[in-house]
Image (cartoon, rainbow, N blue to C red):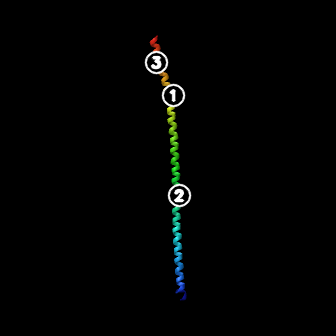
Amino acid sequence: MGATSGPAVKEQFRNESYLNQAQDSIRKNQQKHAAQVENKGVVGAKIIAKCVIGLVITVGLVVFGTIVVRGFNDMKDWRGEFVEKIGERRAEEWNMRNR
């Protein structure tokens, strides 16, 4: 009965208490680590999403700018041709009037 009472029992309870505390600490650390790993994944996904969005916006602006510049250049060409045709018509009208 000496092993089931007295200092040996107190020592066993103390050891079990330490074991329980250690297991709780390990469990909390694992949960914390799992949350950190999950959070890192979310942060990484957010960064990738921002990069993709930025790239899409940049490409869109470049394409839009190219279209606008080409449109202005075509407009200049069209305006030049239009002015030339009007000049030719006026010259023809003037020649017809003076004949």
User: Who comes first in sequence, dot 2 or dot 1?
Assistant: 2
Q: Mark 1 sits on what residue?
A: 77
Residue with the most extreme bottom position: 1
Q: Is residue 44 above or below residue 61?
A: below
Query: Mark 3 packing: few (<14 Cα in 10 Å), some, or many (20+)?
Result: few
- Callout 1: helix, strand or loop? helix
User: Who comes first in sequence, dot 1 or dot 3?
Assistant: 1
Q: Kindly identify the amino acid type of the residue bearing the numbered disc 3.
A: Arg
Residue displayed at 50% across by 25% down:
81
Query: Mark 2 packing: few (<14 Cα in 10 Å), some, or many (20+)?
Result: few
Answer whether labels 1 and 3 touch (C-beta < 8 Å).
no
The alpha-carbon separation of the residues under discs 2 and 1 comes to: 54 Å
Q: Mark 3 sits on what residue?
A: 90
- Callout 2: helix, strand or loop? helix
User: Who comes first in sequence, dot 3 or dot 2?
Assistant: 2
Q: Mark 2 sits on what residue?
A: 41
Residue displayed at 46% across by 13% down:
96
- Callout 3: helix, strand or loop? helix
Answer whether labels 3 and 2 touch (C-beta < 8 Å).
no
